[in-house]
Image: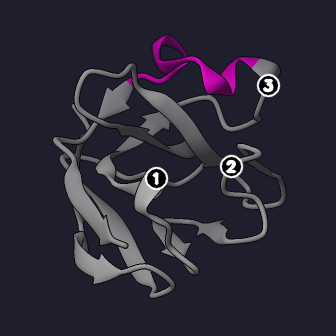
């Protein structure tokens, strides 16, 4: 059973950067598609970014495109805004290719417990 753990969250000022990490225990993420979602209080879990099992394909939400970069096991977040404040969750799926369904939380097989990102304006 793959277990995911996120780290790297914190409180920053608007315009600053953070880099989130996602590591696995109980198995390997080799060949797994990986994704990041976020959830603010009172809101639904929202897709942020995904990367295919090979690392060749990526997908981003419009709200973070050009500011965030996903790589295998990481999410680099630049030019942070107050609206980026949320709990950030790492997901993994055993089938590597991405599909249009990556934006759906139910698409992902495994989840971490999340790491909080707070951006002060």
Q: Which residue is mark 1?
A: 83
Residue 103, compared with residue 61, is above or below; it is above
Locate residue 8 relative to residue 100 in the image: left or right: left
Q: Residue at x 24, y 69 (%)?
A: 9
Q: Which residue is mark 3?
A: 99
Q: Which quadrant of the structure image shows residue 71?
A: bottom right
Q: Which residues are magenta?
A: 101-109
Query: Are the two marked residues, 2 and 1, in contact with CB atoms closer than 8 angstroms?
Result: yes
Crowding near the residue tagged with mark 2, few <14, some 14–19, many ≥20 C-alpha atoms within 10 Å = few
Q: Residue at x 62, y 29 (%)?
A: 95
Q: State the CA–CA distance, disc 2 to disc 1.
A: 10 Å
Asked which secondary structure carries label 3, the reply is loop
Asked which secondary structure carries label 2, the reply is loop
Residue sitting farthest toward the bottom: 16
Q: Position of residue 61 (x, y in %)?
A: 71, 43
Q: Which quadrant of the structure image shows residue 56?
A: bottom right
Task: Say which quadrant the C terminus sits in.
Answer: bottom left
Q: Residue 63 bears which disc, if any?
A: 2
Q: Position of residue 42 (x, y in %)?
A: 25, 21
Going from N to C along the chain, the mark reached first, 2 or 3, is 2
């Amino acid at each position: 059973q793959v277990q995911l753990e996120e780290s790297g969250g914190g409180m920053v000022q608007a315009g600053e950067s953070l880099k989130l990490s996602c590591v696995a225990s109980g198995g390997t993420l080799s060949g797994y598609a990986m994704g990041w979602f976020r959830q603010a209080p009172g809101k639904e879990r929202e897709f942020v970014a995904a990367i295919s099992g090979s690392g060749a394909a990526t997908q981003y939400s419009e709200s973070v495109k050009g500011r965030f970069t996903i790589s295998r096991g990481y999410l680099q977040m630049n030019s942070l805004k107050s609206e980026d404040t949320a709990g950030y969750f790492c997901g993994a799926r055993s089938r590597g290719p991405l599909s249009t369904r990556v934006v759906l939380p139910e698409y992902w097989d495994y989840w971490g417990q999340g790491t909080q990102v707070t951006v002060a304006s």
